[in-house]
Image (cartoon, helix red, strand yellow):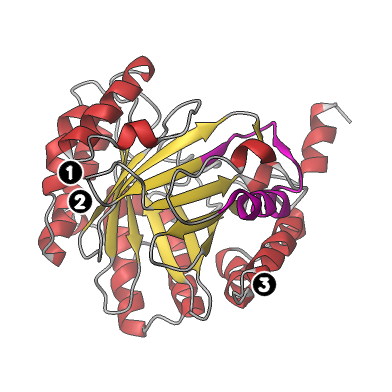
């Protein structure tokens, strides 16, 4: 790994970003039942991917104001639930979080991906084909490159990279996205996407995926439950009623008037341009008073889909000793996922909160009012 060549310790000292996130990941691995050997491999991988930032004291501000999380921690976790199975654990990392520029951030991210490819013997060819579009000499926008790892048994994760379609400017993001999809063989894919208020991410599966996907994320301002029901462009999968039920159950409202909703379509075949998967992401932290309220909603949604909520309940104390009622944002998003040929999934995105705890919503309103 690139971090090892920089002399990064696999066990950063106490009070550092690496020590905190390493410990969080170890406890989450225990929650989902990964072996001790796999847990150690993945904890070491996280620390190495963070590079020098792993040894940065938490008494200092975040290494950069990363877009990856609300408190600018360059790490996010997620648990993906399916009926009758243990949830899968993922970790999202910004390897270039300590860089002085967006260009350097992207360069470090590429080095990290390529080091992982050498270590786990997978190809970066698809990323190489579109590198110039998303990592130009002077990239713009809120991110350069993030790496997501799905931590499967066996110590070899599934790898995914996230890229920024607005890297050459927000006005050029649609053109950049169309070019990238054409280069990747999905010439008709852009036409299949729903209308949106921007495209924040393109994601690529790399490594040991059964059917590698290209995933396009779309942003929806002021999204209503009615409009959400019509977002999916898959030939099979969730109908409007199922999407709308999930929307109401997680957001507890019929309109997302604060933080926008996100949808994602994944593409695996290149002939028709029809997506094979659809996901609706609800930013639940902006539509609840505190994490206790969000957890209650999540538990109800998981049970309604035939999924065991206990791992999610156990994941919160694995991340922090604080009570769910003392903040909001520990569960950042809840997502309904449909992929062709697979049962529905529900994914909970979990924050590290290495730098800050967002106070409950009522407290924020009182503070804003000067009370």
Magenta residues, as a range? Answer: 239-262
Q: Is residue 197 above or below residue 55?
A: above
Q: Horizontally, is 164 left or right of 270 in the view? A: right
Q: Secondary structure at mark 1?
A: helix
Give the class, few, some or many, for how many residues have Cα within 10 Å of label 1's Cα (few <14, many ≥20).
many
Residue tagged by mark 2?
A: 113
Tag of residue 127: 1
Tag nearer the camera, 2 or 3 = 3
The earlier-in-sequence mark between 2 and 3 is: 2
Q: CA distance from mark 1 to mark 3?
A: 38 Å
**Tag 2–tag 3 contact (CB < 8 Å):** no
Question: In this view of the protein, which residue sits in the foreground, 113 or 338?
Answer: 338
Check contact, mark 1 vs mark 3: CB within 8 A: no
Residue 70 seen anywhere in this rendered image of the structure: yes
Disc 2: CA contacts within 10 A as few (<14), some (14-19) or many (>=20): many
Q: Which residue is mark 3?
A: 303
Secondary structure beneath dot 3 equals helix
- Please tell me which of labels 2 and 1 falls first in the chain: 2
Instruction: Compare residues 207 and 62 and report the one nearer the observer.
Output: 207
């Amino acid at each position: 790994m690139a971090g090892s060549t920089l002399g990064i310790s696999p066990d950063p000292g106490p009070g550092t970003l690496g020590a905190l996130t390493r410990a969080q990941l170890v406890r989450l691995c225990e929650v989902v039942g990964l072996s001790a050997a796999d847990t150690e491999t993945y904890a070491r991988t996280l620390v190495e991917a963070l590079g020098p930032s792993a040894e940065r004291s938490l008494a200092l501000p975040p290494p950069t104001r990363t877009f990856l999380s609300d408190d600018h921690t360059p790490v996010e976790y997620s648990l993906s639930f399916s009926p009758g199975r243990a949830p899968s654990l993922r970790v999202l990392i910004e390897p270039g979080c300590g860089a002085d520029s967006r260009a350097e951030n992207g360069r470090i991210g590429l080095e990290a991906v390529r080091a992982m490819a050498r270590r786990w013997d997978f190809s970066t060819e698809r990323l190489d084909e579109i590198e110039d579009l998303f990592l130009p000499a002077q990239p713009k926008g809120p991110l350069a490159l993030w790496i997501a790892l799905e931590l499967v048994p066996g110590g070899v994760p599934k790898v995914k990279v996230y890229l920024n379609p607005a890297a050459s400017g927000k006005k050029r993001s649609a053109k950049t996205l169309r070019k990238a999809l054409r280069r990747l063989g999905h010439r008709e894919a852009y036409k299949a996407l729903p209308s949106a208020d921007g495209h924040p991410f393109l994601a690529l599966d790399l490594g040991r995926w059964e059917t590698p996907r290209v995933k396009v994320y779309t942003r929806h301002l002021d999204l209503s439950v009615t409009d959400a029901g019509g977002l999916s462009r898959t030939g099979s999968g969730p109908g409007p009623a199922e999407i709308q039920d999930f929307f109401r159950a997680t957001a507890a409202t019929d309109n997302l008037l604060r933080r926008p909703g996100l949808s994602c379509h994944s593409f695996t075949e290149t002939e028709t341009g029809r997506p094979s998967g659809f996901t609706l992401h609800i930013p639940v932290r902006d539509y609840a008073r505190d994490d206790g309220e969000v957890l209650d909603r999540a538990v109800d949604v998981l049970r309604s889909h035939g999924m065991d909520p206990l791992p999610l309940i156990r994941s919160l104390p694995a991340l922090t000793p604080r009570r769910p009622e003392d903040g909001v944002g520990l569960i950042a998003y809840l997502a309904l996922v449909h992929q062709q040929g697979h049962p529905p999934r529900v994914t909970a995105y979990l924050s590290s909160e290495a730098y800050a705890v967002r106070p409950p919503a009522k407290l924020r309103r009182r503070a804003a009012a000067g009370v």
